[in-house]
Image: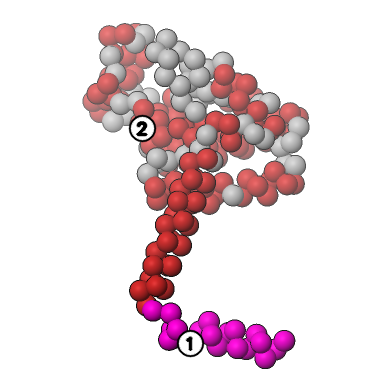
Amino acid sequence: MLRLSKRLWHWFTRPSVLIGQGVLLLIGGIGGIIFWGGFHTAMGATNTLEFCISCHEMRDTVYQEYKASAHYKNASGVRAVCSDCHVPHAWGPKVVRKIKASGELYHKLRGTINTPEKFEAKRAELAAHVWETMKSTDSRECRNCHSFEAMDFEKQGRRSRREMEVVALEGHAPDGSSTCIDCHKGIAHNLPKTEE
């Protein structure tokens, strides 16, 4: 057995004599395409609403809140799904977010938020983490859909119009806030009790 494994290792590591370099390149190219296609497919599949709510922790809590929000049902019929707000659209930041999200599997296995009571106990911590991330990216995911150029300030309420016009012109609201999440916490999910 040892002799066989040494022969296999030697065959694997020696320069090719039996197989042409073009064949090896072709095999590597096809393998790369299959890997990239699988990777891209997996990235897309994990960005769907169905994937996000496949865990009861999400389906029974934040999904129910989201269904009552304007991001789910509104006059224009445009719906934002979980990944629109929580996953960057650009490829590099998206991969980083997916790697960070793999830590959520650990908590899924541990049952960290597997009951409504446990979820509520962690809600403030979870929300603070999401808000911190959104603030650090200048609410990048909000801005993927919302832009000052597309806003019709005339159709906004008086207070909203006053605040949004100043932010559009000066880069910050009169109270000093400067990014979407500063004013719009709780837009799609219930606020933690400490924030109400």
Q: Secondary structure at mark 2?
A: helix
Q: Residue 186 in the image: state x and y as whole percent.
A: 53, 23
* Residue 167 showing in the rendered view: yes
Relative vertical location of residue 74 with respect to residue 191 in this rendering, above or below:
above
Q: Along the horizontal axis of the image, is 42 left or right of 153?
A: right
**Mark 2 and mark 1: span between their CA atoms?**
50 Å
Relative vertical location of residue 120 with respect to residue 36 in this rendering, above or below:
above
Q: Secondary structure at mark 1?
A: loop
Dot 2 corresponds to which residue?
144
Q: Residue 96 in the image: state x and y as whole percent.
A: 47, 51
Quadrant the N terminus occupies: bottom right
Relative vertical location of residue 187 with respect to residue 102 in this rendering, above or below:
above
Task: Locate residue 163: give its quadrant.
Answer: top left
Identified by mark 1, the residue type is: Arg
Relative vertical location of residue 21 with respect to residue 184 in this rendering, above or below:
below
Task: Locate residue 121: give its quadrant.
Answer: top right
* Residue 177 showing in the rendered view: no
Q: Main secondary structure of the magenta part?
A: helix
Disc assigned to residue 85 = none
Residue drawn 63% across the image and 45% down it? 104
Q: Residue 183 in the image: state x and y as whole percent.
A: 44, 24
Quadrant the C terminus occupies: top right
Identified by mark 2, the residue type is: Asn
Q: Which range is magenta? A: 1-20
Residue 83 is inside the magenta segment: no
Task: Locate residue 53: give its quadrant.
Answer: top right
Colour approach in the figure: secondary structure
Residue drawn 58% across the image and 36% down it? 51
Q: Along the horizontal axis of the image, is 82 left or right of 144?
A: right
Dot 1 corresponds to which residue?
14
Residue drawn 39% across the image and 79% down it? 20
